[in-house]
Image (spheres, rainbow, N blue to C red):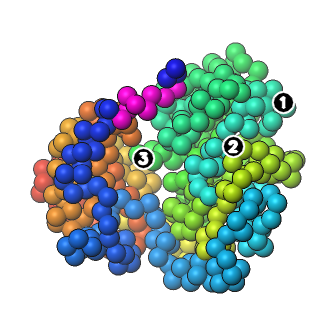
Amino acid sequence: MHTYMNIAKSARISDDFWNVTDQAGMFDLVVAGLGDGRHRRLSDGHEFVNMSSYSYLGLDTHPQIVQAAADGVLAEGSLNTSTSRMRIRFGSLRAAEDELSDLFGVTAVTTASCAVASWVTLPLIASGLFTENIAPLMVFDKNAHFCLNAMKASVADEAEVVTIAHNDVEALEELCRTHPRVAYVADGVYSTGGRAPIPELLRLQERYGLFLVFDEAHSISTLGTNGRGAVLEELGQINDRTVVITSLNKGFGASGGAIFLGPTGSQARYDTAIRNGPLMWSQRINTAGLGAVIASAQLHRTDELAQLQRRLQANVDLFDSMVQTDLSGDGLPIRFVQVGSETATVNLAAALLDRGYYASPIFFPIIGRGRAGLRLMLRANMSAAQIEEFANLLKELNVPAEQPA
């Protein structure tokens, strides 16, 4: 028991931190949306800017995408087919997958969320269905997202599971030398910042046939031509030893998740994905979400996408010029301001909220014990004035200008 997870133990450790967060008024805020990442707390009318929104390009409030979501429901006359997608699906579901496939040069399978994409994909890969019917050694990066790590028990029913240190290419190469089939599970861009060593991983893929599984939830849309993300931009063209899963409701600004498959035998792999696991049942994006996906994919082909990416980068650069963190200069929109003490982190977040800025305090099990801090997500639709004011507040509240390693 508890070979891969121990929910009860994690809950016991983290409950105190959550209770402090709740007492500080930083938990379960009920708000009204004011647009551009601004909110009004319904309990007292307090307005604030959300500094921890993962809508990196601000597309979640883009009028074209919001309107398309409403139109999607009205066009089909229903929110869902209310049956398994493998038996009956609306034309808008096929249209959304066709749009994504064409935009990113992949075979796309849509899912209700990125977590469902993990649930679908990892056991299938572990079973050997994507690796010549030979179950691979499943190697997880220690910092892989929770939705990936949470699948270890299911994956272990199909294949051997190993966890290695974060971005440890040498350890991974040694496993590739000593095992005939290896699959590596990692984030392209990690939810607390930083990215995978993608060029080095592709070198191992070319040399050893390493199978790569990337969670690109925090990279799609924000990076690359037409928002292809860190992995696809480095690859140029997805191959048959790479699977990408992603969220469509972060930078993409729509709803749901997706699995991106390579070209060879794509129909067979597509059929495998939808005929096995969660997609056999009722897991699919509703018609509002599908309308938004189609509209966002179309917007990704326009000059507006590149303009939003440049605006986001300018905001990242501005923040980095004012607040030094371990991640400064990496070109990504996620910043982690380490505080250390969980209580001190929550108190700092509460003080910032009082001054009009919500910054999410994160602690165990999201991050290691004693390493609590603020997770910040910069957005294209933040003004320079908002970033400057927030950065000055961090300094005023005595956050160190340079974070510990």
Q: Main secondary structure of the magenta part?
A: helix
Measured as percent of width and height from the top left, residue 201 is found at 63, 35
Q: Is residue 65 above or below residue 347?
A: below
* Residue 306 visible somewhere in the drawing: no
Q: Quadrant of the C terminus?
A: top left
| Closest to the observer, 251 or 401 | 251
Q: In the rendered structure, which amino acid carries the disc numbered 2?
A: Thr
Q: Residue at x 50, y 41 (%)?
A: 145
Name the residue at 59% across, 61% down.
256
* CB under 8 Å between discs 2 and 3: no
Mark 2 = which residue?
Answer: 121
Disc 1 + disc 3, Cβ < 8 Å: no
**Residue 193: numbered disc:** 3
Q: Earlier in the sequence, mark 1 or mark 2?
A: 2
Give the residues drawn in magenta, as a range: 4-11
Place of residue 78 in the rendered image (x, y in percent of width and height, measured from the top left): 67, 77
Tell me which residue sits at (50%, 72%) in the image.
59
Q: Quadrant of residue 161?
A: top right
Give the labeled residue for mark 1: 133
Tell whether 289 sits left or right of 370: right
Direction top: furthest residue: 178
Spatial CA distance of label 1 from label 2 is 15 Å
Dot placed on the residue nearer the N-terminal end, 2 or 3: 2
